[in-house]
Image (cartoon, coloured by chain):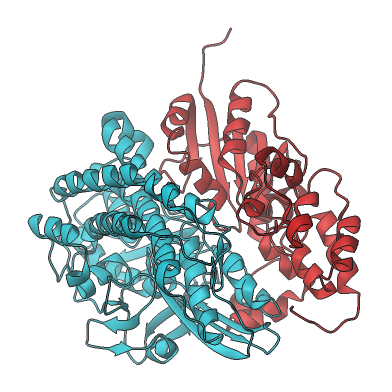
Amino acid sequence: MHRSRKLTIRVDALARVEGQGALHIQVRDGQVRALRLEIYEPPRFFEAFLRGRRFDEAPDITARICAICPVAYQMSACNAMEGALSLTVKGPLRDLRLLLYYGEWIESHALHVFLLHLPDFLGYDSAFDMARHHPELVRKGLHVKKAGNALMAKIGGREIHPINVRIGGFYSVPSRQALLSHRDDLTRARDFMVEALHWMAKLDFPEFEEDYEFAALYHPDEYAILEGQIRSSKGLLAPVSAFEEIFEEIQVPYSNALHWTLRGGGSYMVGPLARFNLNFPQLAPLAREVATSIGLVPPVRNPFKSILCRGVEILHACEEALHLIERYEPPERPQEAVAIQAGTGYGASEAPRGILYHRYQINSQGLIEDAKIVTPTAQNQRRIEDDLRKLVPSLLSLTKEEITWRCEQAIRNYDPCISCATHFLKVHIDSR
Amino acid sequence: MARHRKSKLAVWKFASCDGCQLTLLDCEDELMTLADQVEIAYFLEASRRRMRGPYDISLVEGSISTPEQEEEIREIRRQSRFLVAIGACATTGGIQALRNFADVRQFLDIVYARPEYIKTLKKSLPASAYVPVDFELQGCPIGKGPLLELLSAFLNGRRPNIPSHSVCIECKRRGTVCVMVAQGIPCLGPVTHAGCGALCPAYRRGCYGCFGPMETPNATSLGEWLQAHGTSPPNLVRLFRSFNAYAPPFQEAGERYAQVPQVDDPS
């Protein structure tokens, strides 16, 4: 009965996402005629002003691209620079990096699950409203977030833009005792996540499935987070240095952002759903067990269930962090020696939102001559639009307010970090 | 006396990394108490709800870097009883103010294949370049402690107690041995605003000035001292030109060493 309905949906400023974006959808005769995820986050030109900076400044400078995942930037930058300098960080220093990164995963995922995404499922505008009826849920969710933040602050110096990361390792390393003090909080966070996942599995998930092409890093020894090769659900396995051959960047005049697609193909998805589907066997046993018990097994093709995958990843991160703390002995030196040489380095790591790729070319004096950064949200953007294009026609019997909210929720499935996407920009749009 | 009404809090974002508003969400222990004390009227990172102005207090994150943002900050000023700039971007233009030292068109060419699609201002500037600002909270990112002090002071109708001395004082309080004196590590602590708790020296690295200049800093003296102890002018330029590059004292110091002709030696 709504087939002939004319509908225009505009959300001028998307809420509960990091950064600034807007959504525009035009429907005529039951067909989506126009759909744009507009990003008006202003450009900040990181790749431009990195030129001429010293190689060892990259981790601190690029951290400022995004405050929700600064460690991801620092780790991808270190990976790339250490590649250019033929340096490998191993043993306890690598463990410490992993531990710092797990802290970030816990913090970032808990923020999204409990404060940003869950209110959609329960019908609240915000976690503040949700807290009036579910105070325990919000309180415990905040505890999980705090456990991650505390770990980051201990190893990194502070939660946002940690100061302790450098090429080759750290400026200083914590004592064993300092890390052991985090066990209780992490254990509590882990136990709550087991409970929360059983409860969250009963949420009302919109029926929506898509045959995605997933892409994530793969590491033979662990659920890849710090480093790995690029793997896709269509069977691809390639080194990070092939990133720009596998994927391509497209700047299209009718859009407001640089899109990333598979070279010669379409959109692809990075992030928790992709990692879960591609690397499920490498999750911590408890995370796998809980996922299986709530019926969450690969392939998960419903993007609304990304909230569960994030929950499973929090559980995994808590478990792994506890193991790393248990076996931690401070390394002899806080960093490996660094010798400057000219070269090009490629680095990637799994930011909470997906693959974060850095490439740097440095000269014999250690100065950056060229920099390239590809963020997860830039890669997911086209995929988000594709999801919405498919979703909207199935929603037309709902009210405009309901359609709008459901579309917002579908965007939040990707936990888009628009501040991250330095390529995102507002452009003139032809309108008649 | 009038019926008690909760103060309306708004949080705004301009060019930034979201870190300073995230600092508010990172106050895990205080967040829900705060949500009871104030009406969170506009805070897009956390809520769909958008209440119209006027607002009792607006926290502004990010630098002004596009023509639309210039309009927006003026409108926010009109709608706000107190306007507080939070963080390095909103108080000095932030890391993206590095464009202020270059030709922004060149930057566009480097980053974008089709630079003609992009609208941007030549300079990235703090909110105070466009509107009167009632208070500035420095830092990249701001600290939780200073943010809570600011909000608490506002709710209780008093001036916030935010020390404007240097990071050096915080090192002394913390009992950290001076990294510059003891280890010869270049450190911006003597000219940098307190607020981080002197983190970097406690982790055995020099302060890199992310809280911006302290009140009345002597950057000239520090620069001379660092140069005399082996920091090359190009490295001094980099040191002063980072997250608060366009703050006047750092800008001045950066310009002084940028004019010294010398081969760039990274060591």
Look at the image and tell me whether residue A45 can be seen. no
Look at the image and tell me whether residue A384 can be seen. yes
Residue, x 30% and y 54% (percent of image)? A322
Q: Is residue B50 left or right of residue B82?
A: left
Residue nearer the viewer, A105 or B201:
B201
Give the image location of residue A236, x and y in percent.
27, 88
Spot the red chain and give its letter. Answer: B
Q: Quadrant of residue B183?
A: bottom right
Residue nearer the viewer, A175 or A315:
A175
Residue nearer the viewer, A269 or A323:
A323
Residue, x 56% and y 40% (percent of image)? B144
Q: Is residue A136 left or right of residue B212?
A: left
Q: Is residue A37 left or right of residue A358?
A: left
Taking A135 as reference, is B93 above or below it? below
Taking A183 as reference, is A238 above or below it? below
Give the image location of residue A378, x and y in percent.
44, 72
Residue nearer the viewer, A11 or A138:
A138
Spot the cyan chain and give its letter. Answer: A
Question: Which image quadrant: the N terminus of chain A?
Answer: bottom left
Give the image location of residue A143, x and y in percent.
35, 40
Q: Quadrant of residue A385?
A: bottom left
Give the image location of residue A40, x and y in percent.
53, 63
